[in-house]
Amino acid sequence: LKKGSVSSATTLPSGLTIVTENASLVSTLSLTYPNAGSSNEGPSEAGAALANRYLSFKSGSGLSSALILRSLEDVGASVFSSAGRRGATIGFTAARENAAFVAPLLVTECSFEKWDVKEAQDLAAAEAGEATSNAQVTLTDQIYAAAYGAQSSMGRSYYT
């Protein structure tokens, strides 16, 4: 901890633990879903983790994608999302005084519009296509396949 900073941990009834520290002028809030990676996909679900990454900050709880992103941009928040074999994370970084305002946008109930899903599928397909010509991705996929078996959920490519 930085000198003069105060940190606290709060555990919600759901079991979620929130750790806060008041030493920074910006706040980063992220939600990690440890079972949302491609290693938890069945063969018929292959590619879902990649597509879900592109569905981050899309419509939900009666809010459109445009309204969600405009609300985040209006307070200067920058969003991020990632996914991989072992999990997925979404979040944002914002000025400390604005973090509480935009935090509820991370936990909106998902209700994706058809065009959001189509766009996510197209972006995921494009990324998967680019990944096939990337030597680093190919090498990583081969290492995972050798370590876990090519037909196992951990051995399959994240980009499948």
Image (cartoon, grey):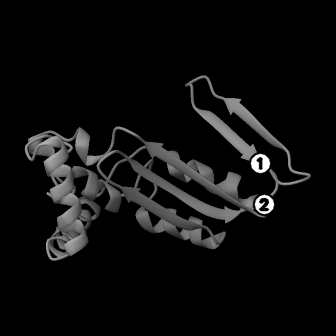
Judged left or right of residue 24, residue 157 is left
The residue at 18%/58% (across/down) is: 141
Q: Is residue 75 above or below residue 58?
A: below
Q: Which one is in front, 128 or 113?
A: 128
At a point 14% along the width and 72% down the height, the residue shown is: 129
Residue type at mark 1 is Glu
Q: Amino acid at mark 2?
A: Ser
Observer-nearest of 101 and 1: 1
Locate residue 99, reporting x and y percent.
Answer: 68, 56
Element at label 2: loop
According to the picture, the residue beneath numbered tag 1 turns out to be 21
Specify the label residue 24 is tagged with: 2
Whether label 2 touches label 1, CB < 8 Å:
yes
For residue 118, say whether it is visible: no
In the rendered structure, the answer to whether residue 120 lies left or right of residue 91 reads left
Q: Position of residue 117 (x, y in %)?
A: 24, 59
Give the percent coordinates (x, y) of residue 44: 9, 43
Q: Which mark is residue 48?
A: none
**Residue 63, image x, y percentages:** 46, 56
User: How far apart in space, not on screen, are marks 2 and 1 (Cα)?
Assistant: 8 Å
Mark 1 Cα shell of 10 Å, populated few (<14), some (14-19), many (≥20): few
